[in-house]
Amino acid sequence: MKIIPAFFLALFVFGMAGWLYVVGIQYFLDYTVLTAPLTHYSKWPRVDDFGVICFIMAFISLFIFILTNTNDKMPKWL
């Protein structure tokens, strides 16, 4: 695997992990507020901002990974 597709695949995995973290917080701890700060050290980013940023990052990373992956064994559409 080349460096650039591997980098964007890693961004996709960590972006989805961050988004699933936010979804898990809201599902299992439904008494929490999405507008709460992500950490008590700063007021930004909030939990909802973090979830949106992670989802957008994962979507764009997967798209770039698919475009830059030149493995001949994979179908062209994947």
Image (spheres, grey):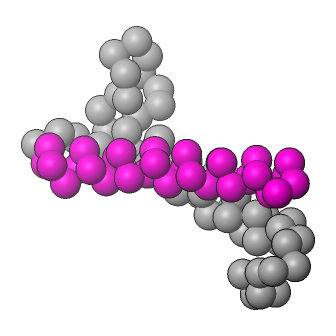
Please provide percent x and percent y for residue 28: 15, 49
Q: Quadrant of the C terminus?
A: bottom right
Please provide percent x and percent y for residue 13: 56, 52
Magenta residue check for 74:
no
- Give the residues in magenta: 1-30
Quarter-of-image position of residue 65: bottom right
Q: Quadrant of the N terminus?
A: bottom right
Residue at figure coordinates x 40%, y 34% from the top left: 46
Q: Is residue 44 left or right of residue 7?
A: left
Residue at figure coordinates x 32%, y 39% from the top left: 35
Q: Is residue 30 left or right of residue 25?
A: left
Please determine whether, in this image, residue 73 is positioned above or below residue 35.
Answer: below
> In terms of secondary structure, what is the magenta stretch mainly?
helix
Residue at figure coordinates x 76%, y 52% from the top left: 6
Please provide percent x and percent y for residue 76: 81, 86
Q: Nearer the viewer, residue 62 or 33?
A: 62
